[in-house]
Image (spheres, helix red, strand yellow):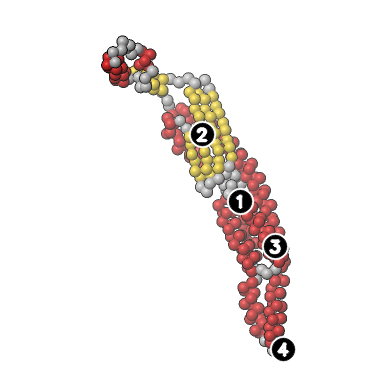
Amino acid sequence: MKSMTGYGYKEWQNDSLFLSVEIKGYNNRFLEVFVNLPPFLASIELKIKELTAEFCRRGKVEINIRLKELNSDMEVSINWGAAEAYHKAIETLARNFKLKDKPGLKDLLALEGILQIDKKRDNEKYWLSLEPLVKGALEQFNIERQREGNHTKDDIVSHLDSIRKSQCIIQGYAPQLEKDITENLRAKINEYLSDKIDENRILQETAILLMKYTISEELSRLDAHLTEFREELERNPAPGKKLDFLSQEINREINTIGSKSPVLEVNREVVSMKDALENIREQLRNVE
């Protein structure tokens, strides 16, 4: 089991290039990958997202890539059209205001667009250096998510054990609940009819009340859901969605048991189960 939150960071440098990769993870229902990198590397964004999808199934993943060229090949050219336009405009301005100053080289070089810089960049070459760095950061990110996920799993299991314990206690009250229904019904019929008791009528009424108030079916379904929950927790490396669904089913059975039972001890255990389940559902919001 992995958490959806985590952090990973790797950096690398040689004589001409510095690269760093920072990864942050947050909770999210689906996988969303956001990559922040220099504009000229936009063509490799898809590769980074595909690589991330090999490590993550759910969550919001932010990847920040910094690149600094320490020594790069470049070509510098002059934009003659811009230079002539600037020069002409400045001379016209000086003439109109009867100024003796003329535009010098420093003045022209300070203006935008006079010099044009073209850096020779090969994105595939950058990717050769960046790919292992991204993988390393993702592996570190996964280690962090696994570590946090293990703690989350332990916490979920402890709350699951609490629900199972309460379920066993309630199971012990189920026969008594059916017995109390039968005895209460017999006492009421005896009170109204005295010695004219129709045993078949008692059995019919008892069956109707048992169908309405018995919790045996709910306990059976709850047991099945708890078993499936535990198995899913152990066998599925990314069980978040399935466990969320099972939590809803478990919650439905617990609520039904609480609404049917008039026994104080049973209702006390229902409250305990609902509290444990709420803690589980809170933890599942962070499970991949």
User: Residue 256's x, y, as percent?
Assistant: 61, 65
User: Residue 238's x, y, as percent?
Assistant: 57, 48
User: Residue 128's x, y, as percent?
Assistant: 49, 29
Labels 1, 2: front one: 1
| In contact (CB < 8 Å): disc 3 and disc 2 | no
Q: Residues within 10 Å of mark 3 (few under 14, many from 20)?
A: few
- Going 61% across and 51% down the picture, which residue do you hit? 282
Residue at the spot of label 3: 268
Secondary structure beneath dot 1 equals: helix
**Taking 276 as reference, is 56 above or below it?**
above
Labels 2, 4: front one: 4
Question: For residue 90, what is the image quadrant?
Answer: top left
| In contact (CB < 8 Å): disc 4 and disc 3 | no
How far apart are the two marked residues, 2 and 4, measured between alpha carbons? 86 Å
Q: Earlier in the sequence, mark 4 or mark 3?
A: 4
- Specify whether residue 25 is in view: yes
Residue at the spot of label 4: 195
| In contact (CB < 8 Å): disc 2 and disc 4 | no
Tell me the kind of residue under disc 2.
Asn
